[in-house]
Image (spheres, rainbow, N blue to C red):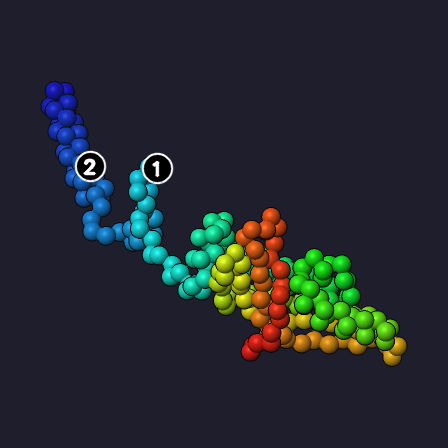
């Protein structure tokens, strides 16, 4: 009986040794594992993040710094968003003959150019509406400060669809336009809005 117990103990010890050796070999990660390349690095809260490549800043017109020196809140992105809204509003108001809207957004000189066209269209009993096929592309071409006056030239590229209703019926026209609009505002004015003072044709 004692011999059988001793044999069982020896077998148990041998089994334990074999299992330990198997665990030591199979349980250890040897070399680079296939999943190593799929694991994202862990970023601990409070630890500095890995440096990211800096995006190249787009060149800005020299006058932008001069405008910011007088108005620290000036931001090119917000300005161009506002310019695009003004552009689309003015184009639609001109097509529809909305003089009240035009007077609020354009200078007297620009209005004096728009008004005869609106009057002639009304005399011919023509009515026009305009819609933008896509939002107009808007780029700042030029900026400067002259005394208390800030001036900015904005290039607009747009695709329009106009509908004209006249005595002969309806006509639909699609066209692309490229124009440079000049906006101005005085730093001394309480009105923060920019006014359209000039419209020029541009190359697409």
Work out how far the residue at label 2 is from the one at label 1, CA to CA, in angstroms: 41 Å
Residue 137 image position (x, y, % from top left): 57, 67
Task: Indicate the quadrant where residue 135 lies.
Answer: bottom right
Question: What residue did someone put label 2 on?
Answer: 19
- Percent coordinates x, y for residue 119 in the rendering: 81, 71
Marks counted in the figure total 2
| x and y, in percent, of residue 76 in the image | 50, 57
The residue positioned 32% from the left and 45% from the top of the image is 49
Q: Rate crowding at label 1 as few (under 14), some (14 to 19) or many (20 or more) other CA atoms within 10 Å.
A: few
Q: For the residue labelled by badge 2, is the local secondary structure a helix, a strand or a loop? A: helix
Q: Which x, y percent locates residue 118? A: 78, 70
Can you say which quadrant of the picture contains the N terminus?
top left
Image quarter of residue 177? bottom right
Q: Which mark is residue 45?
A: 1
Among numbered discs 2 and 1, the one appearing first in the sequence: 2
Camera-nearest residue between 30 and 62: 62
Question: Circles 2 and 1: CB distance less than 8 Å?
Answer: no
- Element on which disc 1 rests: loop
Apparent side of residue 31 relative to residue 42 in the rendered image (left or right): left
Extreme residue toward the front, this view: 147
Q: Residues within 10 Å of mark 2 (few under 14, many from 20)?
A: few
Q: Which residue occupies 38% across, 61% down?
A: 56
Q: Can residue 65 be seen in this view?
A: yes
Q: Residue at x 67, y 62 (%)?
A: 106
């Amino acid at each position: 009986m004692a011999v059988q117990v001793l044999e069982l103990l020896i077998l148990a010890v041998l089994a334990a040794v074999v299992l330990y050796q198997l665990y030591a070999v199979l349980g250890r990660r040897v070399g680079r594992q296939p999943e190593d390349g799929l694991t994202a690095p862990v970023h601990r809260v409070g630890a500095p993040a890995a440096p990211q490549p800096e995006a190249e800043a787009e060149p800005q017109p020299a006058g932008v710094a001069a405008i910011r020196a007088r108005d620290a809140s000036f931001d090119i992105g917000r300005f161009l968003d506002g310019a695009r809204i003004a552009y689309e509003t003015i184009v639609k108001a001109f097509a529809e003959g909305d003089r009240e809207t035009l007077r609020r957004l354009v200078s007297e000189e620009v209005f004096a150019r728009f008004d005869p066209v609106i009057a002639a269209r009304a005399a011919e009993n023509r009515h026009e509406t305009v819609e933008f096929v896509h939002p107009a592309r808007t780029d700042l071409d030029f900026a400067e400060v002259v005394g208390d006056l800030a001036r900015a030239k904005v290039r607009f590229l747009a695709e329009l669809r106009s509908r004209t209703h006249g005595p002969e019926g309806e006509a639909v026209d699609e066209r692309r336009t490229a124009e440079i609009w000049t906006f101005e505002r005085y730093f001394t004015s309480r009105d923060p809005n920019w006014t359209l003072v000039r419209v020029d044709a541009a190359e697409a």
